[in-house]
Image: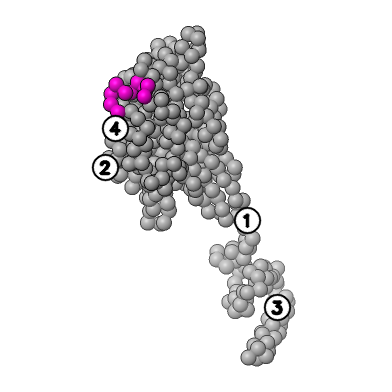
Amino acid sequence: MQKSFMRKYAAFLALLLISVMAISCDASVQMLTPSVTAPNLYGETQPPAEIETAEGEVPGDADGGAAAAQPEKQLPPDTKVSFLACGDNIIHSNVYEDALTRGGGTEYQFIHMYDDVADLISGVDLAYVNQEGPMGGEKYGYSGYPTFNGPQEMGDALVDLGFNIVNIANNHMLDKWESGFLDTVAYWKTKDVTLIGAYLDKEDYDDIRVVEKNGIKIALLSYTYGTNGMVLSKGSSTVIPLIVEEDIRRQCGIARDKADFVICSIHWGNEDWFKPSAHQLDFKDIMVECGVDVIVGTHPHVLQPIVWEENSEGHKTLVIYSLGNFISTMLYARNMVGGIITFDIVRKDGVITVENPLLHPIVCYYNRSRRGLQVYKMENFPAELAASHGSQKYGAFDINTLKRFVTDTIDSAFLPDYLKS
Ligand SMILES: [Zn+2]
């Protein structure tokens, strides 16, 4: 068997040699040379038949030629980007008044409200926050609910903590009308952050923001369900990025062309609902179908589920329906429990996936005077602070109740060990 194969193979090589010599006399020798050498590039396992079928073809043409010309195309190097997202940063009047007290009555000092979670934020490559409400500056006067305007010192604190992606598309974005919004944008433009959710005209709206980190390009989309009835100035070119199917589909396409990975920040859902609404489910389906990699949901002021979804092409999407509040002085225990999601964007062998998604539940504390604000990781939240929480006035506030808001809502696959059932 082996001898007969060797004989056939030797005969074939002899034929090949003759044909190569014949071709060498032809004027087209320069063009044809690569088709003779090409099999070597495939490696030793390439069957001789391939050489025969290549005969007479012009090398470098659409199929075999092009593949042969770039057989050693380098895959991008394996790499990783760590990402974090926090929910609604709401500057209620109690929050900024507390900050003023901490600053000795002369300045607003917010940063220490976040001491217990600061290590998470500073420990990642990219950190996202939804800044709910404008920071248009002192000239608008500071105000809390229902039309917010927080001190810009809060923005300074967020940047100092390590946030480098700031979303301002939410229902409070026009609380100080368009001028307050534009002054908020102008403030954020002085900071070294990627601002999303603010678009000065249609062209700017489709100029999808992309951050590049560790060699991975990440596109950031941003939408909000509305603006609480507040409207833009007459004749304004500003675009409010509303949740519109056509816009989402178009921008997902642009984002996928422009970047390696797509994250969509979306302000949606019903307040105080622990489950996604029909509207959320409908738009989740659209984003999953469009190949968004991660959906970061905000607005319901409580946690909502985290799930994996897969589209018809087998592309997976991590859906975080709602992260709840980051900081606020809302009344009820359920509003005091939020989450910080962390995950890694990993590129291995040229394929990008989301790895290690983990929700770090947080508890926001305020005392009976609605001061003393402090955001804690749930595992660090002291039991004695549960007893003195100002929210006690509005219903049960104990550590087991707080944990249940998490464990009844979030699949244990996304929770730290101490909360796994
Ligand atoms: Zn909201």
Q: How far is the residue under mark 1 from the one under mark 4? A: 50 Å
Q: Considering only order in the chain, which callout, 3 or 2, is on the residue closer to the N terminus?
A: 3
Q: How far is the residue under mark 2 from the one under mark 1? A: 45 Å
Q: Which residue is mark 2?
A: 278
Left or right of 119, for residue 87:
left
SS at mark 3 in the image: helix
Magenta extent: 387-396
Q: Which residue is mark 1?
A: 74
Q: Nearer the viewer, residue 55 or 320?
A: 320
Pointer 2 and pointer 1: residues touching (CB < 8 Å)? no
Question: Which class describes the residues within 10 Å of circle 1: few (<14), some (14-19), or many (20+)?
Answer: few
291 shown above or below 186: below
Q: Amino acid at mark 2?
A: Ala
Q: Nearer the viewer, residue 325 or 241?
A: 325
Q: How far is the residue under mark 4 from the one under mark 3? A: 78 Å
Pointer 1 and pointer 3: residues touching (CB < 8 Å)? no
Mark yes or no: residue 90 visible.
Answer: no
Q: Which label sits in the foreground, 1 or 3?
A: 1
Q: Position of residue 198 (x, y in %)?
A: 43, 29
Q: Which label sits in the foreground, 4 or 2?
A: 4
Q: Which label sits in the foreground, 2 or 1?
A: 2
Pointer 4 and pointer 3: residues touching (CB < 8 Å)? no
Q: Nearer the viewer, residue 33 or 38?
A: 38
Q: How far is the residue under mark 2 from the one under mark 3? A: 69 Å
Q: Which label sits in the foreground, 2 or 3?
A: 2
Q: Amino acid at mark 3?
A: Val
Q: Considering only order in the chain, which callout, 3 or 4, is on the residue closer to the N terminus?
A: 3
**Quarter of the rendering containing residue 88:** top left
Q: Position of residue 320 (x, y in %)?
A: 39, 41
